Amino acid sequence: MSDPRTIQKVLLGPPLGLEQLVAVARYGAAVEFSPDYQARVRRSRELVERLVAEGRVVYGTTTGFGNLCDRVISEEEAAQLQLNLVRSDAASVGRPLTREQTRAVILMMLQNTGRGFSGIRLETLELLRQFLNRDLIPFAPREGSVGYLTVEANIALVLLGEGKAFWKGSLLDAGQALEQAGLSPISLSYKEGLALLDGTTSATALGALALFDMIQAAKSADVIGALSVEALKGLIRHFDPRVSQVRPHPTQRDTADNLRRLLAGSQVIEEAKGSHLQDALSLRCIPQLHGAAKKLLYDARETFEVELNSCTDNPILWDDGDQAEAISACNSDSAFVGMSIDACCIAATGIARMSERRNNRLVDGNLSGYSWFLVKNPGLNCGLMVPQYSQAGLINDMKILSHPATVDGVPTCGNQEDYVAMGYNAGKKAIQVAEKLEYTLAIELLSCYEAQGFMGTDAARSPVSRQVYREIGRHVPVIENDFYLYPHMEYLRDLIHSGELLAIAERIVGGLK
């Protein structure tokens, strides 16, 4: 994975990856349209205008929507049809999406309609692009989507000067926000409202953000797991490459290789050789559990990167050179991304469960041989007793959130949509799971750091351990007496979330798999 913090500009047209999406959504990378992107949008627009001129019946363009698809709409009513659609579908409720989530959805709206099969005008997409480049953030309530329509409709409303938007931190009426950003509202033409609202854009956007963080956290878990193995004087033989040769899952093999590289040069690990027969599962089974989780995460990445570069509109406009067609089908179904990210929630929860067990071994004096809760005067001080409680609460939430959203569905649209994939809810809860995984790992990392004073050896730590602890030591004190832990746990979570922990390790051992 490349570092999205270093990406300054994303060109739409070439394939889009997770890192580019995160660069735009989280770090504000500028967005430009390639000549190919612009050309295919113009060709698609010419096609929809030709279909309308020929008097063809096109769903959502010259007809109503959903189970009203048999109602023909006159040419004079076409613009009102699109406006009515956007207004009526802006029906989500509750707190708005965050800045980065909204930006990710906008980027996916540009990707979906920019594939050249949606018939939208380039000037409409240009205004949407300026939302990103000028950081104008539409107010998009997050609750009440089944995978499309409602979140996107709130974003599309701002194109029209309706709804609300954030500008420089203030929530304003959309018209006022546009004016202050130096932009003007537009009116929608044939099919544009439907093209903006339809598709897996919000489900893919939220799921992609979560997936990026989960993959980064899974690799960070290898780093933190290695620190725990060293702090608990574990055995390197558990990660012998011959173990993976007889069970040749690539992600198990690669995780074991990660651990060997992360622990290379550790005199603590050298001294531990032969000291006992085997470690607890939370130490010796890291390649198996982390490897299984990564398998799901990397499979999901393949799925999402197909979806990031797909047209998920309905209908799609097709021109084979002889006859133009508007094909009504259902690429807007979010089952691919929904099922994938549901599985990733289970994977992330598995990593968190193992992290908590390693942390428990560190803070339990009977298991670690260290002072209880890694504080010099336990009893008077609680030390790191209660952060493990926090892990327990986080993991309980993660288990609840790991129930798949996509196994459920409530019919909509007068039973025209009698099956609903619920991929949006899968992506929405995956963001929570990813965050809770990062916090769970941060607490284990805190215990690893505090354990250093109790190891009873002058043997050198691995180069990775030394550099990680040196960085943490600039921000986190060694516990002598109880102090306020919150800011230190937040710092460690940010170290993971930003990718900096992973970067520290990879600068020493190379890229982790």
Image (cartoon, grey):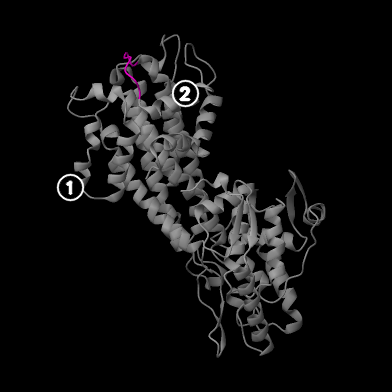
Going by the image, does 65 lie left or right of 310?
right
Q: Note whether 46 is above or below 10 in the view shown.
A: below
Q: Is residue 251 visible?
A: yes
Going by the image, does 342 lie left or right of 14?
left
Quick one: 137 or 328, which is closer to the camera?
137
Disc 2: which residue: 470
Q: Residue at x 53, y 25 (%)?
A: 488
Query: Splitting the image into 4 quarters, where does residue 392 fall?
Result: top left
Q: Give the Cα distance between marks 1 and 2.
A: 38 Å
Magenta stretch: residue 443 in it?
Answer: no
Q: Note whether 152 is above or below 250 in the view shown.
A: below
**Start and end of the magenta stretch?**
455-461
Q: What amino acid type is highlighted by mark number 2?
A: Arg
Magenta stretch: residue 457 in it?
Answer: yes
Do callouts 1 and 2 mark residues in contact (Cβ within 8 Å)? Answer: no
Q: Is residue 84 visible?
A: no
Secondary structure type for disc 1: loop
Q: Where's the C terminus, which quadrant?
A: top left
**Marking on residue 246:** 1
Quick one: 404 or 256, which is closer to the camera?
256
How many numbered circles does the render carry?
2
Percent of width and height locating residue 208: 50, 53
Q: Give whichever of discs 1 and 2 has the lower sequence position.
A: 1
Q: Residue at x 26, y 50 (%)?
A: 249
Query: Splitting the image into 4 quarters, where does residue 313 fall?
Result: bottom right
Percent of width and height locating residue 5: 57, 44
Percent of width and height locating residue 285: 27, 37
